[in-house]
Image (cartoon, coloured by chain):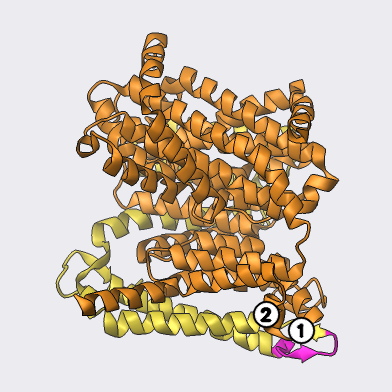
Amino acid sequence: MEEINALFSGFAVAMTPFNLLLMLIGVTLGVIIGVLPGLGGANGIAILLPLTFTMPPTSAIIMLSCIYWGALFGGAITSVLFNIPGEPWSVATTFDGYPMARNGKAGEALTAAFTSSFVGAFFAIVMITFLAPLVAKFALQFGPPEFFSVYLLTFCSFVGMNKGSPFKTISAMMLGFALATVGMDTVTGQLRLTFGNPELMRGFDFLIAVIGLFGIGEILLSMEEGLAFQGAAAKIRGKVVLETWKQLPKYWATSLRSCLIGCWMGITPGGATPASFMAYGVAKRVSKDGDQFGTGKMEGIVAPETAAHAAGTAALLPMLSLGIPGSPTAAVLLGCLLIWGLQPGPLLFVEKPDFVWGLIASMYLGNLAGLFVVLTCVPLFASILRIPFSIIAPVIIVICAVGAYTVHNATFDVWLMLGFGVLGYIFKKLDYPMAPMVLALVLGDRAEDSFRQSMLFSQGSLDIFFSNYLVAAITSIALLLLFWPLIGKLIGKKKAAKA
Amino acid sequence: MSEQTNNSNEDSVISIRVMDIITALLFLAVGLTVMIGSLKLGASWGSDGPEAGYFPFYISLIIMLSSSVTLYQAAIVDKEKKAESFVSRESFKQVMAVLLPAIVFVLGVQLIGIYVSSVFYIAIFMVWLGKYPIWKAIVVSVGVSAALYLMFEFWFQVPLPHGSLFNPLEFFGVN
């Protein structure tokens, strides 16, 4: 099969000593980032991105994706040991992870978490290996209307799937689009919405938004409780690891189910966080020991961790093959590719197979490296959290400021970062979802371009979005998802009226 | 956020409902601004396709529509939410304790550069909130700043802000 051939050539690209070193550095940095509050996967990649400008794109994306792995693993450490989720997708891991640690079984809990993460991610990487080229081939037939309809589908599914108010989702999303339009218009060359301010000519960069929203906003939120990190001690000894590994195959069904949930949520714009909650909920209902979930059952760790990592990885599939990120972190990686002048999407597989397969190969290696690093270094990472908040908080903010500045060498961006931070704080508390806003900021220009090109073909008529079966199907699903909350309410009312 | 006390929750700085209303109004303001800006650019069909303001105009329209609904929901439909607090006084103080120094820090970054500002920022934070002795605070903050300098200016060759007003580092003979 040509995919296997391509994969092996990818391994050849990925396994240079330089790249392997970058993998290890990336994973270690990623775990540290995952452990610290305020620095998350998306955020950390955004901050470290300018450092990779001097590297060749393949090495750079390998390091950045390994940071992503590290962060995925790192979030579990604080969830299990400190009951503090280091990442939003580790929240479900605290439900059974922390009780297990309190019962003295921290080593088992951590091993279970890391191994499940590895399995989930591995499953998703294999899926990417075989599916991504297929999807890319399929998408080569896409024209601007098809692309726009897929963007429409992405954004409408946010509205449809979000539990909160659809209007808040729409507002947040549209705000992202509006921010994306500021700056120079690529088609007409005109300056849009800059109101004479030269600083706004550059437009709003999604990296700044991500650092502000997810970094500063996160810190402001954590500050509400004040902070006291008192966690269970943890050492992972070899014997514990082996014993836990013996127990894990018992949960193969949970694992498989969670992998599938995770892959699905990763590809559709759900992401790792909803995936972990869904997997936990399903496992709780289906398992024999379901009612004991929450007291420290290993299955309660296996389910969310597998799903979260499968989702986080699967989110890279639409990013690589369609150019549509399935999660905020994938959105940042997409932005990185754009900065390097690479066009993610079906053409990437055709024009730059070395890059794509090098990246996919590095995912296998990075996943393995991540598992190795976390299993051996847990006490080290855990001790980072014992550094008092009065030191860590300002240091994190300094790092965020550095990250924001180095994107465009502009101090204005650092102020913007603070602004986005306050915005993130307020949005989080008022239930305005931030993921669609970030996605809109990243994809806004491309969505607008496809819309404009489609309109040019059709001379201003919206019919073009229903002009062939494919486009019509996607657009219809998109509109269905958009109005789903309304439909759901109507169905509910009918049921209530009948009853 | 103004100091509006709420009738049932004495500890609260401001209620969720009021914040929702304020946020919805801000969204409306943003929508209006974008709309005006895009109308100036021309929001209809030009000679060779959509004008620059076409897309932003419709975006601003949607923002205004959806935030009007949010406003309506917050102001009229969710009246019971009056009781829920957006942030309590204690939490608000903690948040401000991080936000206000951060603002001063960024001001410092702009005026006197990041290296000196971060020394002050970290040291003051450690002494004030962490109650550390001054010598420890200085050691840590200078250490972090020096590490930043080495990593960015030397290793990665990425310049960080040196201050638009004046560069204190010049006194030390460092660029």
Image: magenta residue range:
B40-48
Task: Say which residue label 2 marks.
Answer: B55
For marks 1 and 2, give the CA distance.
Answer: 8 Å
Task: Give yes or no for contact between labels 1 and 2 (Cβ–Cβ under 8 Å).
Answer: yes
User: Chain drawn orange, letter?
Assistant: A
Question: Going 77% across and 23% down the picture, which residue do you hit?
Answer: A16
For badge 2, the amino acid type reads: Phe
Q: Is residue A353 left or right of residue A66?
A: right
Q: In which quadrant will I find the C terminus of chain A?
A: bottom left
Identify the chain drawn in yellow. B
Query: Dot 1 corresponds to which residue?
Result: B50
Q: Split into 4 quadrants, where in the image is the N terminus of chain A?
A: top right
Q: Nearer the viewer, residue A244 or A191?
A: A244
**B1 relative to B143, above or below:** below
Q: Nearer the viewer, residue A121 or A59?
A: A121
- Identify the residue at the far top of this view: A239
